[in-house]
Image (cartoon, helix red, strand yellow):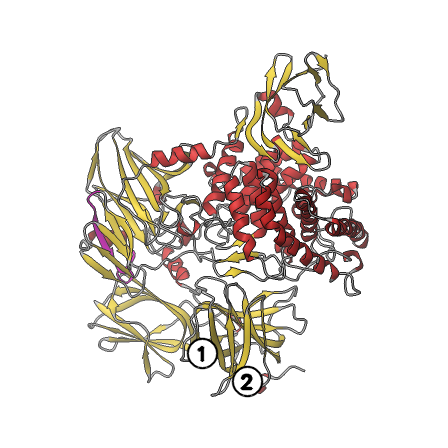
Amino acid sequence: MALAVAAVAGVDLRQPWRASASDQVQAQVVARAGGGQCLRYDFGSVSGYAVMRRELPLDWPEEFELSATVQGTGEPNALQLKLVDASGNNVWWINRPGFQPTAQGQVLRAGRRGIAFAWGPAEDRTLKRTAAVELVVASTGPGAKAGRGEICLTALSLRPRTPLTTPPSRPVLMKAQGTQLQVDLGRERDFSGLLLRWATAPKRFSVSSSMDGHHWTQLTLARDATALDAFWLPESQARWLRIEGSERGFELAELRLPSPEPGADPDWPDRNAMLAGLARRLPAGTLPRAFGGQQSYWTVVGVDGGAEHSALIGEDGALEIGRGGPSVEPQIRLSDGRWLAWDGAAIGQSLGEGWLPQVHLAWPGLQLDIRAAADGPREAPRLLARYTLRNTGRAPLTLDFSLLLRPLQVNPPQQFLSTPGGISAIRQLAWNGQDLTLGNQPLLRAGAPLTVRALPFAAGLDREALFRATPLQGELYDPDGLASAALTSPTLTLQPGESRSLDYAFALSPDTRLGAPPDLDAIARAWRQRLSRVKLTLPPGHEALARTLATATAQILLSREGPALRPGTRSYGRSWIRDGAMMVEALLRMGETDAARDFVDWFAPQIFASGKVPCCIDRFGADPVAENDAHGQFIFAVAEVWRYTHDKAWLARHWPRVKQVVAYMDGLRAQTQGPDTPPQAKGLMPPSISHEGYSDKPAYSFWDDWWTLRGYKDAVQIGQALGEDTALVERSRDGFARDLAAAVRNTALAFQLDVLSGAADRGDYDPTSSTMVLDPAQGAELVPPALLQKTFARYAESALARAAGTQPQRDYTPYELRNIGALVRLGRAADAQALLAFFFKDQRPAAWGQWAEVVVNEPRTVQFLGDMPHAWVASDYLRSALDLFTYSRESDGALVLGAGITAPLRNAGEVGIAGLQTPKGPLAWRLLRTSAGWRLAIEQRPEGTPLRLAWPDGELPLARLNNQPMKWEGRELPIPPDARSIELGVAE
């Protein structure tokens, strides 16, 4: 029976609490001497969480205030107060990332709007009844530092409140009394900010609040008034406000009170929301488009392995100086006082030298080209930027060029994971005539004369005011942490057709050395050489295919931190084995062997002592969340590196861990043999949330199972290569294959499906997940052919309808690129090519050859995009794009050539690939158009590997080798080991 609200106005904390923790994290509950309960924890060398929990059945009122008082010691970490329903599957929470415990009590306070539904399968996510409460310390999210510590819960109470049924009335501005102006809010108000627009402004002012009109609390510090003054005041409450000016006669034109209350002014839950509110009232272009309700796009600028110290360049030309750092944005002031910025420009993007991201802004008579790159060691790189101004008019042009240093990331406000986007604090700036520092960190060393002007946030955001400010000499301190600065070059006069370039070097690390002059051309040459190892030959009109092969490879390298392969540089500051294993395959095929091997060597020692493979690793160590695809993925990654390097000594070093992981997989399989397992899931991996679609509740995901099959297969291959006895592993492999084949059939019967299911207990349709059947699991023989064909026929039909606009297009993830490779393997090359063209249209910006993790149907609709570029998506592209030209087939050990090369490509001109790495060595081939048809030229082939040419569509040509006819087998032509040139003639 749930307790009534009145019974828990103050919870008796002496009732029993239980401690639990994730793998290798220590946790203990200790009663506090002064009352309350304490959770002691030690993360050791891993990532994870520590929990203290007690049963506390509650029926929640319509409106309430929940408060929890906590104190403690230790490093900042995520502090979570969780409310769990009786099923244990549905969770609501108060989540405070980067919470710093203190010896003095801190109060976590929230009403219904402040408690979020965290996860669970419930369709009705309204907080109505819960059964238990948990206090959790987790080493996740921004600011987390793990370590050891103690967090004590000293008070927990729930107070009912009267529900608000009517919108608040507008504040009433009372008549000023001397230097004070009182504001009647009409009732007790909850608010998060204050916006004041003056009719007649005082020189300085401050604001106080009161609940009774008699006792006042200072709400803001005194500051100079501007035309529009904004204050972020989180979790504030008041019945009255009082504005105290420095002199008589001031008058307000408008007062806005952002609030979470229904019908109130739009809430300011954070300072990003405050700036967005200001952007709606300021001239266009004053703030970036991300604060004006428009989606923005960007790409990464950095060095290989330097994700933690990478920069971003935005589509409009702003540069973010380091991960989570402030940005610089070009602003031009003409001699007549007009400002030129992104909002009035024609904007385009390109890749300079085929690699360096560039932005082009054009106004009548003037063009600005921005080029960005990075160099230096990955621990301390520098950001290089070149701004080239060109007079495109017919008359001389005089201008002042400035870089506006703003407390804003290029990473926009809606990006919330790992590195939350939006504001980046600028609290203290110092300029000595040569070096600009932010806090105690170097930012810029001037290579040419610069004038620096700076203003605090309280002085407003007007760029004209900043331009008129007194030049900075020494330091500026802004208590709001939102200072801005203008870095202005000497006035330029450009004659018609004349260009002038300005170079800047910014520090991306406290240890960056800024002295050497920048050489963007040398950087471009080095990247071009590295990204040209694999070369595609294509007819005109297919440049995106080759360009994206290079950019996708670079994106994987730029997104890794040292050896740790990561899906991105901002939202995902950790390394998943899932992403990493597929990146390993892509990198090996592209010739990046060292990066692939380094990842496996780095990841392997962090596997748990039990043999459990962590789903991911962050800066604190292994994450314990059970994701049952991880084990097969690790073994696959080890096997792939060995297959491409043939390094047995290296393989032998990893064999003991491979055996551990196989034993752990065997243990997991044993868990699904009992009566609690659905009949169609017998012998599979236990439920997990590795598939993002199952985060509401763990599922018997076939994604996990196909990776597990791949792991068993590769463990056998590894053991045999080392001369080990693999009989037990073979038994596990074969038994699991039988159980998996039965589960696929039985799930289809149980849910009456004519397609493959994503999970054995859900009967859902997920073709992107099902691509694992074909590769890397290579398990098509275990699946009824009709199910396999129908799965991807249905996908192709739906996706092509989306591409044609005959079916509504929703937001999607470009993980769908995996379907390209699946369609190629199933002989549907025309569908694969059509869909690839569709996906290319969603590269944003198109010239930069990248995808975000989430593609928004309406490009300017604001939404969380994951990371951009997304390196796991990049690996999906690489694997599928290379499959168009060549893929490996496990069943006969063959390399299949040209399975994705359709008639329009073959007929348009030469097609081929060179430098492609395979497990038996490099491969190069070309299909050349001739007067009689085509000629297949095998220019480099791996020894001992069968080659087969696929002809996916159209009439089969007559094949001749040394003027002797050759025989097609279906739509494949076996290529003899000594063949170097085969004539393919059009049938008469």
The amino acid pointed to by label 1 is: Gln
Marks 1 and 2, how far apart in space? 15 Å
Which quadrant holds the C terminus?
A: top right
- Give the residue pinned by disc 1: 71
Residue 466: image location, x then y, percent: 24, 53
- Give the residue pinned by disc 2: 13
Among the 4 quarters of the image, the one containing residue 351: top left
Residue 312: image location, x then y, percent: 40, 47
Q: Earlier in the sequence, mark 1 or mark 2?
A: 2
Residue 581: image location, x then y, percent: 58, 47
Element under label 1?
A: strand
Region in magenta: 448-462
Element under label 2?
A: loop
Q: Residue at x 70, y 52 (%)?
A: 705
Among the 4 quarters of the image, the one containing residue 221: bottom left
Q: Nearer the viewer, residue 318 or 939?
A: 939
In the rendered image of this protein, does residue 680 appear above or below residue 582?
below
Based on the picture, tell me whether residue 452 belongs to the magenta stretch: yes
Residue 483: image location, x then y, percent: 29, 58
Q: Nearer the viewer, residue 747 or 532?
A: 532
Based on the picture, tell me whether residue 475 belongs to the magenta stretch: no
In screen coordinates, is 491 left or right of 56?
left
Other residues around mark 2 within 10 Å, as few (<14) / some (14–19) / many (≥20): some
In screen coordinates, is 441 left or right of 729?
left
